[in-house]
Image (cartoon, rainbow, N blue to C red):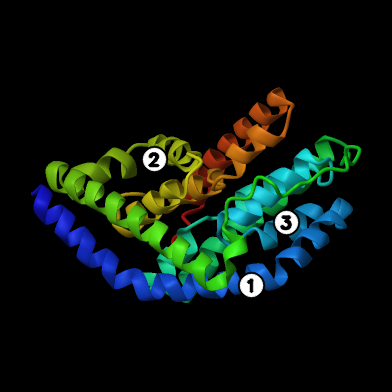
Amino acid sequence: MIIDAVMDSFIDSVKLLPFLFLTYLAMEYLEHRAGQKMQETIRSAGAGGPAIGSVLGVFPQCGFSTVASNLYAGRIITPGTLLAIFLSTSDEMLPIMISENVGVEVILKILAVKVAIALLTGFAVDLLTGNRRRQMQIEHLCEQHHCHCENGIWKSALHHTAEIFLYIMCISAVLNMIIGWIGEDRLGSLFLNRPLVGELTAALLGMIPNCASSVAITQLYLNGVLSAGAMISGLLAGSGVGLLVLFRVNDDQKENIRILALLYGIGVAGGIVVNWLGIMF
């Protein structure tokens, strides 16, 4: 069973390589061409930061959530803007769904739900905190980036493709073994037929500061293991390496913990609302 699971995962993952590379190449092009403009737009957004952040955050990759953490630590953007970016970003969900030929209308609907929740949360947080912009500090904000921007778009796209290929293959192998051992029906019942369990578990998984979490959540949803609400909980709570960078660059650890708690709570609540409203993707 183990050999079959590994071989099936390898074959399925190889089929995704061309789609993943083309997707990352296009995204790297956008990030290199428009990345600085995105940063400047967020910096100058003021009270409208959550609106802009929630829209720009839908672009995957570790770069933008990392930039947001640095801008927040640099006293440039508001807490609401930071949360809007964290909530709207889906890390590797978009390229995986594109490579799996998921319908455009489905992808747009998922992104629209995430953007709406991020937008409302961002404005609510800034409203409750008085929309205070902390005093700006002059410091280098991008030193924590780990996105290989210096290598150019081709090498960077290749790096991301190889990295996500390995994640997909390993996670798919583990999932195949778990599903084969437990059984799809039994595994699905652990999440789908238990109120709150799917949302609580998926949100915890999404908060792991690694793109593997978004890969796992997306694959579990596509395999029918997670409900739409549980998937949304995981994708809302997930922010790539943004949280990890925040805890490193922002000295106020109590503040970081509050942001982490908000991110988890909003992720769970968002998933519950999606299921309650009967929203399907």
Residue 149 lies in what quarter of the image?
bottom right
> Marks 1 and 3: which is nearer the front?
1
Which residue in the protein does label 3 denote? 53
Residue type, label 2: Gly
Residue beneath the point at 64% across and 67% down = 31
Q: Is residue 196 shown left or right of residue 258? A: left
What SS does tag 2 mark? helix
Which residue in the protein does label 1 denote? 30
Tell me, yes or no, if residue 214 can be seen here: yes
Q: Is residue 232 shown left or right of residue 136? A: left
For the residue pair 206 and 189, the one nearer the viewer reads as: 206
Residue type, label 3: Gly
Q: Earlier in the sequence, mark 1 or mark 2?
A: 1
Residue beneath the point at 40% across and 58% down = 164
Residue beneath the point at 58% across and 38% down = 244
**Residue 57 percent location from the top left of the image:** 65, 58
Tell me, yes or no, if residue 102 can be seen here: no
**Residue 146 percent location from the top left of the image:** 58, 51
For the residue pair 274 and 92, the one nearer the viewer reads as: 92
Which residue in the protein does label 2 denote? 198
Give the spatial CA distance, label 1 vs label 2.
Answer: 34 Å
Give the spatial CA distance, label 1 vs label 3.
Answer: 16 Å
**Residue 106 percent location from the top left of the image:** 46, 69
Residue 230 higher or lower than 89, as above or below? above
Callout 1 environment at 10 Å: few (<14), some (14 to 19), or many (20+)?
few
> Marks 1 and 2: which is nearer the front?
1
> Marks 3 and 2: which is nearer the front?
3
